Image (cartoon, rainbow, N blue to C red):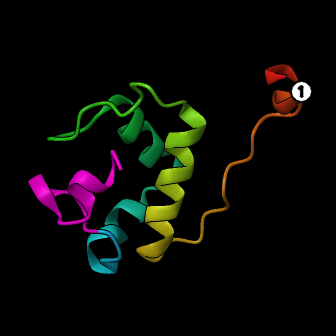
Amino acid sequence: AQCSACHAVGALGSPKFGDAAAWAPRIAKGFDALLESATKGKGNMPPQMGDTTKLEVARALVYMANKGGAHFEEPKAPEGAASAAQ
C-alpha cells in the first residue's frame, strides 16, 4: 500500500506499476541499486523503511520491478529468522 500510493499512478515521476519502459532504465542498474534507492530515498521518493523491514521493502521492490520487466528472485528471509521470531 505504501509503494502503490505513487507507483499505481506514476506520481511525482515514479515508474508506474507495470510500465516496462519506465522501469527499464532502473532495472538496468540492478537490484542492489534499486534497493538502495528504496531504503534511502531518491528524488521525490522518501526512504521507505518506516514501519517495514528491509526484507519487506525488497520483496515489494522485486514484485513491482518484475511486473515492469525484471526477472529478480524474491528475497528470502535469513536462515533461522522464523525460529527466532517464535
How far from the left and from the top, in percent, is residue 83? 89, 27
Which residue is at 38% across, 40% downward?
38
> Looking at the image, which is closer to me, 25 or 47?
47
Q: Quick one: which residue is furthest to the left in this view?
A: 12
Looking at the picture, which amino acid does disc 1 mark?
Ser
Which residue is at 26% across, 60% downward?
7
How far from the left and from the top, in percent, is residue 74? 66, 57
Vertical relation: 63 (above or below) 42: below
| Magenta-colored stretch includes residue 50 | no
| Magenta-colored stretch includes residue 10 | yes
How far from the left and from the top, in percent, is residue 60? 49, 52
The quarter holding residue 24 reads bottom left
Report the side of 7 relative to 72 (left or right).
Answer: left
Report the side of 74 relative to 34 (left or right).
Answer: right
| Residue at the spot of label 1 | 83
Vertical relation: 84 (above or below) 70: above
Which residue is at 17% across, 64% downward?
10
Q: Which residues are magenta?
A: 1-16
* Quarter of the figure with the C terminus: top right
For label 1, count other residues whose C-alpha is less than 10 Å away and answer few (under 14), some (14-19) or many (20+).
few
* Local SS, label 1: helix
